[in-house]
Image: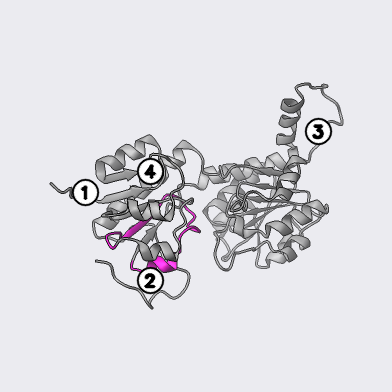
Amino acid sequence: MTSSKPKILVTRRLPESIEARMATLFETDINEGDVTLTADDIIEGLAGKDVLVSSITDRIDADLVARLPKSVRLIAQFGNGVDNIDVEAAWAAGLTVTNTPSVLTEDTADMAMVLMLALPRRLVEGTQMLVRDGVWAGWSPTSMLGHRLRGKALGIVGMGRIGTAVAQRAKAFGLHIHYFSRNRRPPAIETPLEATYWDDLDAMLGVVDIVSLHTPHTRETFHILSAERLMAMKPGSFVVNVSRPELIDEAALVTQIENGHLSGAALDVFENRHGIDPRLLALAEDNKVVLTAHMASATLEARIEMGETVIVNIRTFMDGHQPPHRLLPEGPRDAGRSQRA
């Protein structure tokens, strides 16, 4: 007997509770090896399937979209970012694309705050000194001196859910909140934070001590911290990025840290398509850069909530309704759209 359940391909292992729930609701095929699948692997695995449950490690470009079996109607991304998906090509092919926003807010904001502390207080350097040397000479009045957070100016680029959550945490640490965003936040948000709105990013960058990025990667935000803007930042300031690597001209960032204009950076995301830039690694070895392994959303709670959101998107779509986290392409959306049966 043919199953009436939706048939899905899940390209990476998910928390056990989510896999169990998917197995109950859907006819589920999971990549047990938990390694990045090739395009051919994905196409083969999708034979007869309705839904592709992708993650950020899957490259779903226009070529792969064109090869997808006609049975596939939904790409349900396990993640907030969709830089790995050609959303325009999927739209033109009649596919629906969803993601898992909102559930990552608190964990990502926590991570941003951890990195803000790690840089000026030299937390990683202090740990490595003990682990590497195995001997501690003892406390000294001039040893491991860092910088105080209280009283410093934090410039947030993108005051959405995550940016606001970061501002709330930073305010508790005594930081002065500045922000640049597409739209000014209402007084109900601004006033408790005593936040200063800037409609000119370049002007804000010249006065803040820490810049924290919390905007999605779009055509408009690609290299929003360009070489020119990095040079225009306040001397001795820091950069924190838990969002997307494409927001920063990474080579220019490295140069500005190397030449001493910037004090350092804390990056949970960075260019890694061809391996981490050796210059960036050298700065990390020199304790001027803190690198973490894309861990901003890496809590069990977040991963489970992401999985539940994927399930909601699939069930809503398969029931004939518009899923709550449907994504649309950035450009015009009426021309060239096909329909899938």
Which label sits on residue 241?
none
Give me the residue at 36% from left, 63% from top: 67
Whole-percent x, y for residue 33 in the image: 41, 39
Cα distance between the residues tagged 4 and 3 = 46 Å
Q: Amino acid at mark 3?
A: Met
The location of residue 322, given as percent across then percent down, is 31, 61
Q: Is 136 drawn above or below residue 21 in the view shown?
A: above
* Front of the two marks 1 and 4: 4
Q: Please tell me which residue lies in front, 324 or 225.
A: 225
The residue identified by callout 1 is: 5
Q: Secondary structure at mark 4?
A: loop
- N-term-proximal mark, 3 vs 2: 2
Q: Is residue 142 above or below residue 305?
A: above
Whether tag 2 and tag 1 are in contact, CB under 8 A, the answer is no
Q: Earlier in the sequence, mark 1 or mark 4?
A: 1
Question: For mark 4, what is the residue?
Answer: 31
* Viewer-nearest residue: 228 or 89: 89
Q: Which of pointers 3 and 1 lies earlier in the amino acid sequence?
A: 1
| Apparent side of residue 154 relative to residue 28 in the rendered image (left or right) | right
For residue 240, above or below residue 337: above
The span shown in magenta is 70-94
Residue drawn at (18%, 50%) of the image: 4
- Mark 3 → mark 2, Cα distance in angstroms: 56 Å
**Tag 3 residue:** 144
Local secondary structure at mark 3: loop
Residue denoted by label 2: 92
Q: CA distance from mark 4 to mark 2?
A: 28 Å
Labels 4 and 3 touching (C-beta < 8 A): no
